[in-house]
């Protein structure tokens, strides 16, 4: 058996790699005793590169093409070995293939909100997410710093580290920019450009080329977004006191529609008296010029509440109440 194994190893080797997994970036070609015959054929396909490593040191790098391996096609390895003979003899070396095609639609996002100081809202927490694409363009550097001597290295092995790079760069940029949260949407394109520039240098350090980078969304956590929505609503309303009173007045007819809200008995007899008293209380201070606008709103609100009570007791009909409510609310505008 030992003799047969020796004879088999003397045949010309064919070294090639067909990517079996979509996510494999680096792959070590399996060879018995890590021995390559002089004259072996190496095939490197488009979107691939091959790396020869001799005793732990990078010896040669090959781009796409077909090669016959000998001392002429392996000058760096030849120099390392200090060969002084030209006859055919095997040499030992590990061969790694690298996929250089674009890795598209890699997603990133903040696993937890990041805390920043905002000019308008004080301390806030932000979420952000987006996408990026990259390719491997320097297999020697990637081998030294990332993949090492593993049999295979995948995009999943790399994604976590790359996302950390993105989030770190994003946190620094947002913190230093001083842009308020409400203005970030308008600056989104600028942020993308600056983040890509910052990240490109980081990717390059590990033998990667950042092809594209997008910042798709910047938002607040749900609980903070509700607070911001409430603040925006208050700013739109203006006078919160008047708005609150107006809301209370509009809620009265809803309460009147509840079960037992009115009985419809004796409405005609007491309507004039109840409405007259209520209107007198609301109008008298205003006519005398003794009440401010806020006081007038308070009076009209109180009048509506009293009218609602009369409606609930059946003294007023719903139609009479609605008519007077419309009349009184009209005085607020």
Image (cartoon, rainbow, N blue to C red):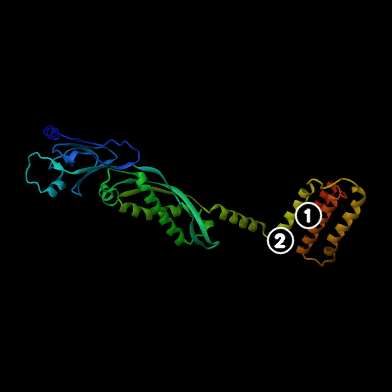
- Residue 239 in the image: state x and y as whole percent: 69, 60
- The residue that appears at 88% across and 55% down in the rendered structure is 274
Q: Foreground residue, 150 or 40?
A: 150
Q: Secondary structure at mark 2?
A: helix
Q: Is residue 262 above or below residue 32?
A: below
Q: How far apart are the two marked residues, 1 and 2, measured between alpha carbons?
A: 15 Å
Q: Residues within 10 Å of mark 2 (few under 14, many from 20)?
A: few
- Residue 82 in the image: state x and y as whole percent: 10, 49
Q: Which residue is mark 1?
A: 329
Q: Which residue is mark 2?
A: 241
Q: Residues within 10 Å of mark 1 (few under 14, many from 20)?
A: some
Quadrant of the drawing holding the N terminus:
top left
Quadrant of the drawing holding the C terminus:
bottom right
In the image, taking residue 76 as reference, residue 219 lies left or right, namely right
- Residue 92 in the image: state x and y as whole percent: 16, 43
In the image, taking residue 147 as reference, residue 316 lies left or right, namely right
Going from N to C along the chain, the mark reached first, 1 or 2, is: 2
- Residue 220 in the image: state x and y as whole percent: 53, 54
Q: Secondary structure at mark 1?
A: helix
């Amino acid at each position: 058996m030992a003799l047969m194994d020796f004879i088999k190893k003397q045949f010309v080797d064919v070294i090639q790699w067909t990517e079996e997994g979509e996510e494999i970036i680096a792959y070590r070609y399996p060879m018995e005793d890590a021995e390559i015959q002089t004259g072996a054929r190496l095939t490197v396909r488009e979107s691939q590169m091959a790396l020869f490593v001799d005793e732990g040191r990078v010896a040669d790098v090959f781009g796409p093409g077909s090669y016959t391996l000998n001392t002429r096609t392996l000058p760096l390895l030849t120099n390392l070995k200090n060969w002084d003979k030209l006859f055919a003899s095997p040499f030992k070396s590990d061969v790694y293939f690298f996929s250089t095609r674009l890795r598209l639609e890699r997603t990133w996002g903040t696993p937890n909100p990041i805390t920043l100081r905002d000019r308008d809202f004080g301390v806030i927490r932000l979420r952000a997410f987006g996408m990026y694409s990259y390719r491997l363009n320097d297999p020697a550097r990637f081998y030294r710093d990332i993949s090492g001597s593993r049999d295979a290295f995948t995009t999943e092995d790399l994604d976590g580290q790359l996302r950390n790079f993105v989030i770190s760069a994003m946190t620094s940029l947002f913190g230093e920019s001083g842009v308020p949260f409400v203005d970030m949407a308008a600056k989104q394109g600028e942020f993308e450009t600056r983040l890509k520039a910052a990240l490109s240098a980081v990717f390059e350090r590990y033998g990667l080329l950042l092809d594209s980078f997008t910042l798709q969304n910047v938002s607040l956590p749900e609980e903070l977004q509700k607070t911001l929505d409430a603040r925006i609503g208050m700013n739109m309303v203006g006078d919160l006191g008047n708005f609150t009173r107006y809301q209370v007045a509009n809620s009265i007819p809803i309460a009147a529609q509840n079960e037992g809200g009115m009985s419809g008995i004796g409405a005609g007899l007491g309507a004039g008296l109840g409405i007259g008293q209520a209107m007198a209380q609301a109008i008298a201070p205003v006519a005398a010029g003794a009440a401010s606008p806020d006081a007038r709103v308070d009076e009209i609100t109180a009048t509506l509440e009293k009218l609602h009570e009369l409606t609930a007791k059946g003294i007023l009909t719903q139609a009479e109440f609605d008519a007077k409510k419309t009349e009184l609310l009209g005085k607020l505008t």
